[in-house]
Amino acid sequence: MLKALIFDVDGTLADTEGVHLAAFNHAFQQEGLGWHWDTALYTRLLEISGGKERMAHHWRTVNAGMKELSAGATQATIARLHEIKTAFYENAVNEGAVQLRPGVLALMNEARSQGLQLAIATTTSPVNIAALLRNAIGPDWRSHFLAIGDASSSPVKKPHPQVYLQVLGDMGLPAAQCLAFEDSANGLQAATAAGLRTIVTPNDFTAHHDFSGALRVVPDLGAVGLAQLREWHARG
């Protein structure tokens, strides 16, 4: 029996990646790094989960001869960049730059009205989740979710299943009674590694990913209701 829906955030709940990209480039400009990520480069970098991890990977790419002695300074710079980027992103979301994807809020409301639990399993930071859902749902958004796993509680990024295992443990439910919602190959791998059947809703940044193993791949949740989800889940 289906008892809970577990949602990824970036790219799944909302098309956030374009705003994240603008936020990264703002941070690079503020710090005078001379970096600029275009859409093609950022699409490739999204194969690495986590903003700090993406920047560290790019740093190593453009500074191939970087010595270990400079690693501490590098990490400090990345942390500062991430702070600037996060502040830019939060401000953009507060100004209405991001909305939930089609069908997301309707499905959440339908699930709650029928007694299902909701949860979040993401590798993004808590402030990013709060900015998005405070604007989309309201100041009481946390009360809508039984469990929230994020970068602060599960630091090992997807495709590792850590965040999903944490959320399942916090909910006290087996994976067999839940459905996960993802938008990327890394997310799908993380969810399935935790034993979760997974619905994938790709976006412009992830449409080229391999979604083998997904329960269903649909453009968005606009035409997906709880009855459909129950049927898919039951068929397995």
Image (cartoon, rainbow, N blue to C red):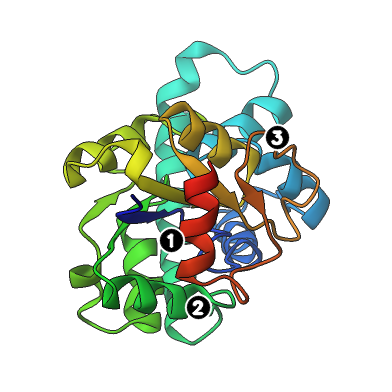
Residue picked out by circle 3: 212
| Residues packed near mark 2 inside 10 Å, few (<14), some (14 to 19) or many (20 plus) | some
User: In the shown orientation, is residue 178 left or right of residue 47?
Assistant: left
Task: Kindly indicate the quadrant of the structure image that contains residue 162.
Answer: top left
SS at badge 1: helix
* First along the sequence among labels 2 and 3: 2
Q: Nearer the viewer, residue 204 or 89?
A: 204
Residue picked out by circle 1: 86
The kind of residue tagged 3 is Ser
- Spatial CA distance of label 3 from label 1 is 32 Å
Can residue 158 be seen by looking at this rendering? no
User: In the shown orientation, is residue 157 left or right of residue 167?
Assistant: right
Q: Position of residue 124 (x, y in %)?
A: 42, 50
* First along the sequence among labels 2 and 1: 1
Instruction: Residue at 21% x, 69% y: name it.
Output: 142
Q: Position of residue 205 (x, y in %)?
A: 73, 54
Residue picked out by circle 2: 92
| Residues packed near mark 3 inside 10 Å, few (<14), some (14 to 19) or many (20 plus) | few
> CB atoms at circles 2 and 3 under 8 Å apart?
no
User: In the shown orientation, is residue 179 left or right of residue 200?
Assistant: left
Q: Position of residue 83 (x, y in %)?
A: 40, 55
SS at badge 3: loop
Can residue 14 be seen by looking at this rendering? yes
Task: Kindly indicate the quadrant of the structure image that contains residue 118.
Answer: bottom left
Q: Position of residue 46 (x, y in %)?
A: 65, 44
Q: Nearer the viewer, residue 156 or 141?
A: 141
